[in-house]
Image: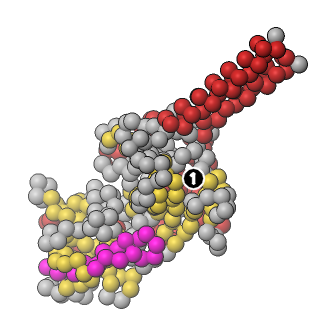
Amino acid sequence: MKIRVKLISLVTCMAVLLVPIYAYAHTVTETGSEADGWIIGTHAPTKEPKFWWTPGTPDKWKNRLNGGNSYMYSETSNNLRVVNSTALETNNYIENIGKPFATWVARVVTMKTTGQHKESWHMQFNTKYDDDYTDTQWKRIAQHELGHVFGLKDLYEDYNSSLLMYGYAGSYSGLKTKDLTGLKKIWGF
Amino acid sequence: MKKKTTLFVVASVSLAVIAFAGFQSMDKNPSVQDSGQVIIEMDATFPNFSTDVVAKKASLIVKGKPVKVVKTFSEGENNPITEFSFKIDEVYKGSKSNEEYISVFQDGAPNNDYDTHPIMELNTEYVLFLEEPLEAQYTMVGGPSGKFEFDATKKSFVSFTNREVPQAQLKSLSVAEE
């Protein structure tokens, strides 16, 4: 009986200690630079932030996002990914839109932050460019946008054009060493 | 023995509570109030089209200067757009005339633009590759892919996407219409 009580106490103690480690990123003090090949901005509060699809989002766009999400998850050693949920559980959403004047391919808009955390964000894909990129390119574009969700900013110097976080689309081929370095500064994996 | 067990349990739980409180305080920026600060950040990815591609897609290629911000507005939710009055100095493709004014729309606003596609500066010379999504309303093909500013050291018009159009080759842009 006594041993059981001690064991339960120990397990409870360890569980409570470990939950914060897996759920929350620590305070990030470095910001990085173009020369570093990573720049840190605000980030989701957890490694698996939730989102919902706006109603009517075609499967094509969902598949592209899911593909990018798979890349992100595997290339971060199964640490970072977004999780599909409902509007009741989260304010974060993802959608495709088509507007006459918008010339961006995709973007992440952060509506609310608390300290370094994105509390509310949405991701959008511009249907204007549907035919300009292959499905594989779109999945990598989605992965780039997830890079923003997880805390990396755009780079725009030519010498960073091979990195996932280069701010101009078309040639992405996944997380490179410098991209990963930036993510590890935030998430510590 | 009962006392020892009780002490052990209390100590374990106390340690857990203290540690949890410690982790909670670690990831908060002490300079920001806990009630949350409303900020809008925009991180946008733009195309990186080659000059050949933008030349083919463009219905109008011009050199000139934005002379006035006509208005800023949001196209849908949180999608700032700036309308410029743009004075044409030279036409390389399309049916406009020199000295003519056109409306050019760009993503972003003067105090809220994209790092990868900064807003045009008034009275600065640009070469623009334009498409016409709505009648008489022009946007840059591929955003920054279609906006070139003169770089005096290179003697070329250079885009934010690191493409160049040497000044000597501007006239050849009209070949794209063929």
Camera-side residue: A109 or A66?
A: A109
In percent of width and height, residue B15 lies at 63, 24
Camera-side residue: B53 or A174?
A: A174
Please indicate, yes or no, whether residue A173 appears anywhere in the rendered image: no
In percent of width and height, residue A160 lies at 35, 45
- Where are the magenta residues, as a range? B71-93
The correct choice, above or below, for A87 with respect to A162 in the image is below
The correct choice, above or below, for A29 with respect to A126 in the image is above
In the rendered image, residue B88 lying in the magenta stretch gets the answer yes
Q: Which residue is farthest top?
A: B1
The correct choice, above or below, for B140 with respect to B22 in the image is below
The tally of labels here is 1
Of the residues shown, which amino acid type is indicated by label 1?
Answer: Gly
For disc 1, the marked residue is A68
The correct choice, above or below, for A7 with respect to B17 in the image is above
Camera-side residue: A143 or B29?
A: B29
For disc 1, the chain is A
Q: Residue at x 49, y 35 (%)?
A: B26
